[in-house]
């Protein structure tokens, strides 16, 4: 009995959408204001300004600078502005928040701007098991974007999916 192997996944018409393909390619750099506070908690304006003047800002060249304070210190808005004023000549982008907050905002903006009209009536698989830290919010955002136009949406891998939505 000589039967040919048939790739049912390839013949199914399923379209795989991989959020990992859109992961930012930028280099991330961190500026934690805590390191420039007295005892990690108190911002002394004169000392803070002096520290920023002496800082080597060139190490942020072409990177996405994540600017935040990792302690519970109360940081005035002007402090973030002052750091940004020094970093803006070097950093490709400055984001107030940590990497998780950046990725949530990055994917939200990206997905809202996507033209998904080519997926009209498609059977979609939103690929899971990414090797990069794609935030859970991105999966929700892409579902919201695709659901009005897709015939069905599943999550996972083509060989093992979890049904999420099917148009009636």
Image: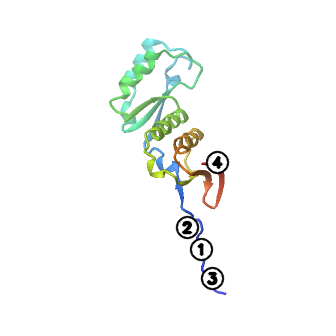
Q: Do we see residue 128 in this rendering?
A: no
3D distance between C-alphas at marks 3 and 4: 34 Å
Give the side of residue 98 with respect to residue 118, left or right: right
Element type where label 4 sits in the image: strand
Q: How is the image coloured?
A: rainbow
Q: Position of residue 39 (x, y in %)?
A: 56, 18
3D distance between C-alphas at marks 1 and 4: 26 Å
State yes or no: discs 2 and 1 in contact (Cβ < 8 Å): yes
3D distance between C-alphas at marks 2 and 3: 17 Å
What residue is pinned by disc 2?
11
3D distance between C-alphas at marks 3 and 1: 9 Å
3D distance between C-alphas at marks 4 and 2: 21 Å
Q: Quadrant of residue 133?
A: top right
State yes or no: discs 2 and 3 in contact (Cβ < 8 Å): no
Of the image marks 2 and 1, the number of the one nearer the N terminus: 1
Mark carried by residue 6? 1
State yes or no: discs 3 and 1 in contact (Cβ < 8 Å): no
What residue is pinned by disc 3?
3
Element type where label 3 sits in the image: loop
């Amino acid at each position: 009995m000589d039967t040919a192997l048939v790739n049912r996944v390839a013949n199914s018409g399923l379209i795989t959408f991989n959020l990992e393909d859109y992961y930012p390619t930028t280099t991330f750099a961190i500026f934690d204001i805590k390191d420039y506070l007295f005892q990690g908690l108190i911002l002394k304006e004169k000392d803070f300004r002096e520290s920023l003047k002496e800082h080597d800002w060139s190490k942020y060249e072409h990177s996405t600078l994540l600017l935040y304070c990792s302690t519970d210190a109360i940081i005035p808005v002007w402090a973030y502005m002052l750091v940004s004023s020094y970093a803006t000549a070097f950093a490709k982008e400055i984001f107030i928040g940590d990497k998780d907050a950046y990725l949530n905002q990055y994917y939200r903006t990206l997905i809202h701007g996507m033209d998904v009209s080519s997926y009209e009536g498609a059977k979609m698989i939103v690929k899971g098991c990414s090797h990069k830290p794609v935030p859970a919010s991105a999966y929700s955002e892409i579902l919201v974007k695709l659901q009005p136009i897709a015939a069905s949406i599943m999550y996972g891998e083509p060989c093992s999916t979890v049904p999420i939505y099917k148009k009636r």
